[in-house]
Image (tube, rainbow, N blue to C red):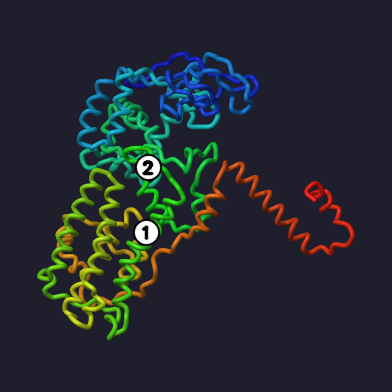
Amino acid sequence: MKNNWLTESTMQQLYCDTCQRFLADRLVEGACPTQGCTNKAARGDQCDNCSHMLNPTELIDPKCKVCKNTPHIRETDHLFLELALLKKRLVDYINDTSVAGMWSQNAIQATNAWLKEGLKPRCITRDLKWGVPVPMEKYKDKVFYVWFDAPIGYVSTTASYTPEWEKWWKNPDNVELFQFMGKDNVPFHTIMFPSTLLGTGENWTMMKTISVTEYLNYEAGKFSKSKGIGVFGNDAKDTNIPPEVWRYYLLMCRPEVSDTLFTWTDLQAKLNSELLNNLGNFINRVLSFIAKPAGAGYDSIIPDAPGAELHPLTSELAEKNSIRVEQYLDAMEKVKLKQGLKSAMGISSDGNAYLQESEFWKLYKEDPVSCAIVIKTSVGLVYLLTCLLEPFMPSFSNEVLRQLNLSLEENLSFSDEKGEIVKAKTPWDFLPAGHKIGRPTPLFEELKDENVSEHRKKYAGSQAERSSKEVADAEAMKIANQLKSTTLSGTLPTWAQTRMGPCL
């Protein structure tokens, strides 16, 4: 405001006489006015179907979502951020940073669409009771619009954590800011918030890299918290499927380029074939063999492996491994998380093939030197996988560290500065000979067909329907238990006649 980037103006807003209040955008629903869009249930701020940003007054046949009545337009004064006046600075920032920060293509497209449409003044206040109050006498009964104050929360959250918050947020020469979000949030982070920061005239750390996803859909429809469609955090916990499985599956399904689909059968396939049969199988085979008593294995002691670089099969594996690690690091630097995860899992696949081709179980008796090379190289790959997969599945990595008998405080970073990238070419050097491992146990459990059917059935329909069904099931179980404890003579008890009469 001191820099004259804010203006006061009168705007038209929807007011519900029945509820006696101005309606927040989320409380208004109507047909999307965008040509070609057929969504009849667009929100007051955005259409989920075409992703077009809206004002509530643009909706066709708007309705109050609380009382279902038609609101009418009232005039009210508000504060506006003058985006058009900040355009030159904003465009310079976007042009420079989108290249340097390797913005995802969908982020660039969404941002350019906004610029092409033309930047207009954007309202930053709302007639609501709940929210951050506007610190001006004239607007004391208003609050900041959530798109304006929510990104400021990134800064204030850091300030709540440490008084030295400016080391992150006002240190652009030494700090790189990465942001991750769904495509519907792009303009708030590439247009709105940068304009707010630029408008202060202060030396803020601006977002450098933005990674934007398309939509993850659920079975035959879309995830929707408001409509109760899909599996949410509390549901995922209730399935008893381990966190690392959820994290792996959702990252493998990450819609980086186009919309993707969550299905229970796909989760089952990825768990059983990729996590259980590939990753878990490789690690368990290696550690279990080392743990076998002397005469059958190495009595939990990692063997020495002199001349590993001269072993043909091992040197071939080391070359593949080096390429996989380079691919992993390149993908992670470019925030292509799905590709990074696939590269890491490729190391596990190579390890399984290496074990099979070497026939290490035969080598143990027939060629103990070669067997030691294969096993020390393989346990090196186990450690490498622990490092590379830690950003994706930290609880998995902690468990593998326990089985390797390594400290949970082990620094699992993988950096060029520490020479770890060079080690990828000699995986037999990751762990020292003579180190005693811990007790190996299986890392993953099979997800069976009956479990999949149960989950699909349980999480079908809306949250409201699910809640009603759970209440009904609980009530039915209560009645059933009461019936079991009741001696039935000629008639049912009064409560049973009342509740169960129609069914009987």
Q: CA distance from mark 1 to mark 2?
A: 45 Å
Which residue carries the number 1 mark?
Answer: 273
Q: Residue 153 appears at what percent x and percent y?
A: 40, 37
Q: Can residue 142 be seen here?
A: no
Q: Secondary structure at mark 1?
A: helix
- Quick check: 165 left or right of 234? left
**Label for residue 159?**
2
- Quick check: 240 left or right of 81? right
Residue at 64% from the left image edge and 50% from the top image edge: 470
Closer to us: 1 or 129: 129
* Quarter residue 368 falls in: bottom left
Residue at 46% from the left image edge and 24% from the top image edge: 125
Closer to us: 190 or 426: 426
* Quarter residue 71 falls in: top right
Residue at 60% from the left image edge and 46% from the top image edge: 466
Q: Secondary structure at mark 2?
A: helix
User: Which quadrant: the N terminus?
Assistant: top left
Closer to us: 37 or 42: 37
Q: Amino acid at mark 2?
A: Ala
